[in-house]
Amino acid sequence: MTREAHPATGSTPPQPTLAELRRSARTRLEAAGSDSPAADADALLAHALGRDRAFFLAHPEHRPPASSLARFRQLLARRLAGEPVAHLTGRRGFWSLELKVTAETLIPRPETELLVEAALARVDGDRQLRVADLGTGTGAIALALADECPAWRVTAVEASAGALVVARENARRLGLADRVQVVAGSWFGPLAGERFDLVVSNPPYVGVHEPELYEGDVRFEPRSALAAGRDGLGDLRRIVGEAPGHLVAGGWLMVEHGFQQGEAVRRLFLEAGFGGVETLRDLAGHERVTVGRLD
Ligand SMILES: C[S@@+](CC[C@H](N)C(=O)[O-])C[C@H]1O[C@@H](n2cnc3c(N)ncnc32)[C@H](O)[C@@H]1O
């Protein structure tokens, strides 16, 4: 970007300071409808500058070089046009991990951490157990569990070729590839004849006609990661129905679902023969994760 000389003085105005950049980006993002304008502005600035937020706070008067400024302005323009911050930075924090994210993966959600918590609270982390994560996306759940429980061996299944590449890269980068095997296929398809102590899944669960598929950041995420038939229960029906054939006696099934699907999912668990069926609420108080044990 070229900087125009001031017509009266002939001098070039100074580059904006970090404080000025953060303030004006926040204002513009807020006006554009972002739910988290301050966090978005800082994440994009950090990415463009290769600096963290602590630097912005310590050096509000710093004037970034023109190349960083140009990068930041491009990122900001894309965010103002609606692209998710995680797609622009290529990163998203989940549990204690930083994961690579692309437009071919779901952006891991904070509420999915409830599924990780549920597993760690109920299943013995010190025993050598076999775990399956169906529809692993970036590998979020599989990698969080493997990181917390080094004794567990996790098989992560994914149907999207683009997401498979990302999940494998995340496993390698986090040093977890020896404990998390990422396999291609549809739900239990690649796991024929195998049984697990724990099966977890955050499958697509939004009905194809739900307006949320066409709103906000979700518009930029893969439809195949989100939508599951008319009522959003198509994939959950299949996973819960087939799970007993892939669990050991006493094995656990834990799935994430929509906040209005708790009752229907509990019914699926009971019909499939699970006991101790319970639905857990997320931080917003919504029914979000249902768990059950094979008697
Ligand atoms: C809601 S996303 C969850 C991703 C990740 N587990 C997470 O929580 O961030 C659902 C994932 O299931 C994958 N998926 C969709 N249909 C599938 C199928 N038939 N078999 C395996 N994975 C599938 C999608 O590609 C997507 O990665």
Image (tube, rainbow, N blue to C red):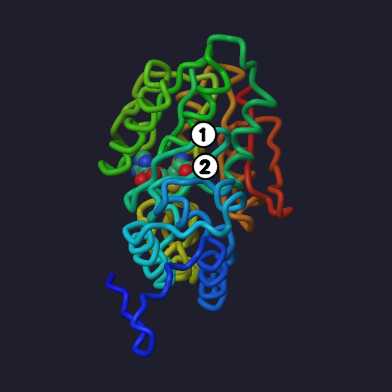
Q: Nearer the viewer, residue 216 or 290?
A: 216
| Rendered view: 175 above or below 20 | above
**Residue at 37% across / 21% down in the picture?**
177
Location of the C terminus (image quadrant):
top right
75 left or right of 295 in image:
left
Residue assigned mark 2: 93
Residue annotated with mark 1? 97
The local crowd at label 1, few if under 14, some if 14 to 19, many if 20 or more residues have their Cα within 10 Å, is some
Q: Which quadrant does ligand 1 occupy?
A: top left
> Where, by quadrant of the figure, is residue 255 drawn?
top right
Residue 110 versus residue 292 in the image, above or below: below
Q: What kind of element bears circle 1?
A: strand
Horizontal arrangement in the rendering, residue 182 relative to residue 35 (left or right): left
Q: Please name the residue shown 38% across and 16% down the image.
A: 178
Q: Residue at x 71, y 49 (%)?
A: 283
Q: Amino acid at mark 2?
A: Gly
